[in-house]
Image (cartoon, rainbow, N blue to C red):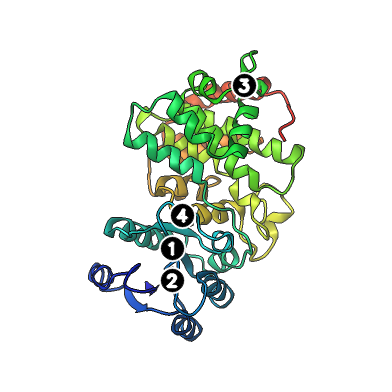
């Protein structure tokens, strides 16, 4: 791993950089204070990761990030952001991941370690370059991540607290209410406030709705195409949750919900399209979506579930787990063929008919309803 840190002592203290350098002898660490020196390094040799402070002495951070994207699109770009301060819009469109200041040792090592693990899982330079060249990658789902952090910090978080957090983004709050009142979730009674939505749906389903609302807001199609993609994802998520034990149900649900996120990226082929299946070196939506989720910093089981949804035997787990649940859920909802040999080897053949019935019942109840 070749890692470049760019920024002064106030954002990137020398002792923190030294600590990172001592973690792994295979990590090549460079630290410079200004953007001009960083640009020369970027032009001279490939980089795996660049970490950029919010302010540089000679140029805006966005300028450097833009140059890294242009010269080394395969490089993972991490932007540091001041606490309680939103980063510039241009930085939001250029960085893959954001870390708050003051920067902690744990957060930095986790970010770098997860990017290294992602590259080992999806060892495809063409994929990294394709994703890196995209002008405007979907931003990480900030409301969802904040909600997860709040729930993990305090299991007794109230419905009012959750509603208040979601209402901090009015656009997401409105979409959550729209989805909550759709035929699949409404149970016949219209809800007009988020607190009631939390109470009715429960935290697990609400997390799915928040995540779906944020992720699919990036879809360019505002009509039936986006709604169908979103609805399919929500049903697949509910199916996957039921296939796994409680300890891993949320991982499976989130992975199934995000399984088709690669379809939101330009220049990516839909692997379910027979004609697109022969499109040369164009990356498929499974690995492209998984790579994006890895850049966002989502857990590795979710990334594996998305990457290997069409071939769950490739996952690192030989038993039926997240990748298997995502495979079954997305295949049943999309009308794809199940890998029955894989299900036989993992002892799940006897459950196929029951899963098919559940999927059919869910899709029947999810009558088309326009979502703005």
Q: Secondary structure at mark 4?
A: loop
Q: State the image coordinates of residue 9 (x, y, percent, origin top left).
A: 31, 72
Sequence-wise first label, 1 or 3? 1
Crowdedness near tag 4: few (<14), some (14–19) or many (≥20) residues, C-alpha within 10 Å: few
Q: Which mark is residue 85?
A: 4
Dot 3 or dot 4, earlier in sequence: 4
The relative height of residue 226 versus residue 193 in the rendered view (above or below) is below
In the foreground, 320 or 201:
201
The picture places residue 353, in percent across and down from the top left corner, at 55, 23
Q: Are marks 2 and 1 in contact (CB under 8 Å)?
A: yes
Q: Which mark is residue 119?
A: 1
Q: Residues within 10 Å of mark 2 (few under 14, many from 20)?
A: many
Residue named by callout 3: 192
Q: Quadrant of residue 347?
A: top left
Measured as percent of width and height from the top left, residue 367 is found at 71, 23
Q: Nearer the viewer, residue 134 or 195?
A: 195
* Distance between mark 3 and mark 4 Cα atoms: 31 Å
- The residues tagged by marks 1 and 4 sit, at their Cα atoms, a distance apart of 30 Å
Rounded to the nearest angstrom, the CA distance separating label 4 from label 2 is 27 Å
Q: Is residue 324 left or right of residue 2?
A: right
Q: Which residue is drawn at the image coordinates 38% and 57% (left, top)?
A: 114
Q: Is residue 316 above or below residue 200?
A: below
How far apart are the two marked residues, 2 and 1, measured between alpha carbons? 9 Å
Q: Secondary structure at mark 2?
A: loop
Specify the quadrant that holds the N terminus: bottom left
Residue 302 disc label = none
User: On the image, numbered disc 2 is attached to which residue?
Assistant: 48
Res 299 visible: yes
Q: Residue at x 64, y 55 (%)?
A: 265
């Amino acid at each position: 791993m070749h890692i470049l840190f760019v920024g002064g002592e106030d954002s990137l203290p020398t002792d923190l950089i030294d600590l990172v350098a001592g973690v792994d002898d295979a990590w090549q660490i460079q630290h410079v204070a200004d953007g001009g020196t960083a640009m020369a390094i970027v032009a001279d040799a490939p980089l795996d990761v660049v970490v950029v402070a919010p302010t540089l002495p000679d140029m805006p951070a966005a300028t450097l990030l833009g140059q890294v994207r242009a010269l080394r699109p395969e490089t993972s770009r991490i932007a540091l952001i001041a606490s309680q301060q939103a980063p510039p819009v241009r930085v939001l469109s250029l960085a893959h991941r954001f870390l708050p200041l003051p920067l902690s040792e744990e957060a930095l090592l986790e970010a770098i370690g997860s990017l290294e693990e992602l590259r080992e899982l999806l060892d495809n330079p063409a994929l990294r370059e394709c994703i890196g060249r995209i002008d405007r990658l979907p931003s990480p789902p900030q409301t969802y991540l904040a909600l997860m952090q709040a729930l993990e910090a305090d299991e007794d978080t109230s419905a009012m607290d959750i509603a208040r957090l979601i209402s901090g983004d009015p656009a997401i709050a409105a979409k959550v209410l729209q989805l909550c009142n759709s035929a699949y979730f409404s149970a016949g009674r219209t809800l007009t406030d988020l607190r009631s939505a939390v109470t009715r749906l429960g935290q697990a389903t609400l997390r799915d709705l928040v995540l779906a609302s944020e992720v699919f807001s990036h879809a360019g199609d505002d009509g039936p195409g986006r709604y169908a993609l979103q609805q399919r994802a929500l049903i697949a998520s509910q199916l996957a949750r039921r296939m796994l034990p409680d300890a891993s149900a949320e991982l499976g649900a989130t992975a199934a919900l995000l399984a088709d996120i690669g379809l939101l990226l330009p220049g990516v082929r839909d692997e379910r399209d027979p004609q697109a299946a022969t499109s040369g070196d164009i990356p498929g939506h499974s690995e492209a979506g998984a790579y994006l989720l890895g850049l966002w910093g989502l857990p590795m089981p979710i990334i594996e579930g998305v990457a290997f949804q069409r071939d769950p035997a490739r996952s690192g787990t030989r038993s039926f787990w997240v990748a298997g649940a995502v495979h079954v859920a997305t295949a049943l909802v999309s009308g794809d063929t199940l890998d029955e040999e894989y299900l036989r080897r993992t002892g799940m053949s006897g459950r196929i008919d029951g899963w098919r019935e559940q999927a059919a019942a869910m899709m029947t109840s999810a009558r088309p309803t326009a979502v703005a």
